[in-house]
Amino acid sequence: GRAHTDSTPFGMPFDRGCSWIHSSDVNPYTPYAREYGFTLESHDGAKEAMFVGHREPTSSEWSAYDRGWRRTREGLSDAGEEGLDVPASEVVPNGIPWSGVSQTWTGPMSMGMDFADLSPVDWWSLSTTKPNLEVKEGFGTVVARFGADLPVTLNAPVTEIDDTGPSVRVESAAGTVSTKAVIVTVSTGVLAAESIRFTPGLPDTTLGAIENMPMGLLAKVPLLFDGYHFGLKPNEWLAYKVPEEVPAQACYFLTWPFNTDMMIGLVGGKFGWELSAAGPDAAVDFALGELRKIFGEKVDQHFVKGDFTNWAYDPLVRGSYASERPGFHGARAALAEPLDGRVYLAGEALAGKYSVTCGGAYLSGERVAGDVMAALGTG
């Protein structure tokens, strides 16, 4: 799935997908990571290196930045708590200095959605991600280790689920399976693309929920340097002032995780989709260009290689994680309804307050598996 640690491009673990164990006090992967001996580090105290062009902000600019963050969060929180299911762009006051940064962090680089496409109610319904843990060996490695001894068949994409006979028939590249019930955990992007044919077709309520819970996009642009760290500290955030007319074209960075020589750039929302369409080279060029605005020619002198996580066009995912469209709160609950007592849906989109996380996907699958066992009389 979207938990994938890849050591090939850089000779060190790099999480192409999810990389933080969010809500680690309740995340089911936390005890496994500790049991398996993975190296865990809290990331809740990470500081932020901020720039205005090539310089650091003045004290008054820092104060304006703090006010921008506060007004942005207050607008979202108040609207979410009041149940205002409208675009987030309508509940944040316009023209707040520095709010372009806070909106970029909160929307495209957190939810994978620009504020025009983000529902405050959906955002409000999600749990805070703290406490957050980073995994030196990669979160994807934890997930792979968890599943190493399970009877899983890989490289067998499903093409049809037929629910018309005495058994549910599942057609895949590995052949046909007949079963009493099936749990479908693919993304809403895959469902919307109709990559799996459902026979009979999906009910209208399910189709509506799929349409109204599209995939957002958060993509990564990892950049490897030769050991020169530009005065930046490990495990910090690097950001810069953008225009207040959002969505902005921006790439913010996690610097030197676990004291490696890698920066991990983040791009999301509409601009993330545009960069994905342009291709990996364009994404790396953009990220380097943003760093040049801050650090000048030193960037090219010390740059080694880069990469891009193009989840947008991965046919097995088609995005990063799902969010409800403004005006359609309840889509998550509607999609979670069993189709007929034999076909069930689960995954990160249907994990309640832990949606959009890997741990939430686990919890959703566990809950639905319990529902299936109860329905079949085996629980």
Image: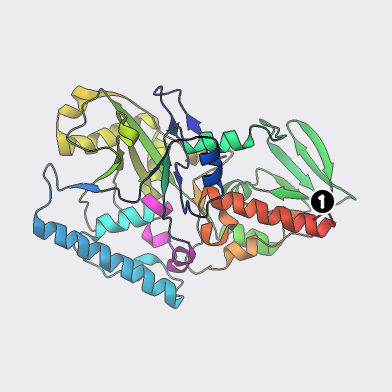
The kind of secondary structure element at disc 1 is loop
Who's the residue at 57% across and 39% down the image?
A: 1
Is 222 magenta? The answer is no
**Amino acid, disc 1:** Asp
| Residues in magenta, as a range | 109-127
Which residue is more in the foreground, 224 or 256? 256
Q: Pick out the residue farthest to the right.
A: 166
Who's the residue at 48% across and 62% down the image?
A: 126
Who's the residue at 48% across and 41% down the image?
A: 312
User: Residue 223 location, x and y as percent?
Assistant: 32, 30
Is 126 magenta? The answer is yes
Magenta: main secondary structure equals helix
Which residue is more in the foreground, 129 or 178? 129
Q: Can see residue 273?
A: no
Quarter of the figure with the C terminus: bottom right
Q: Which residue is mark 1?
A: 163
**Residue 342 falls left or right of residue 52:** right
Residue 157, image quadrant? top right
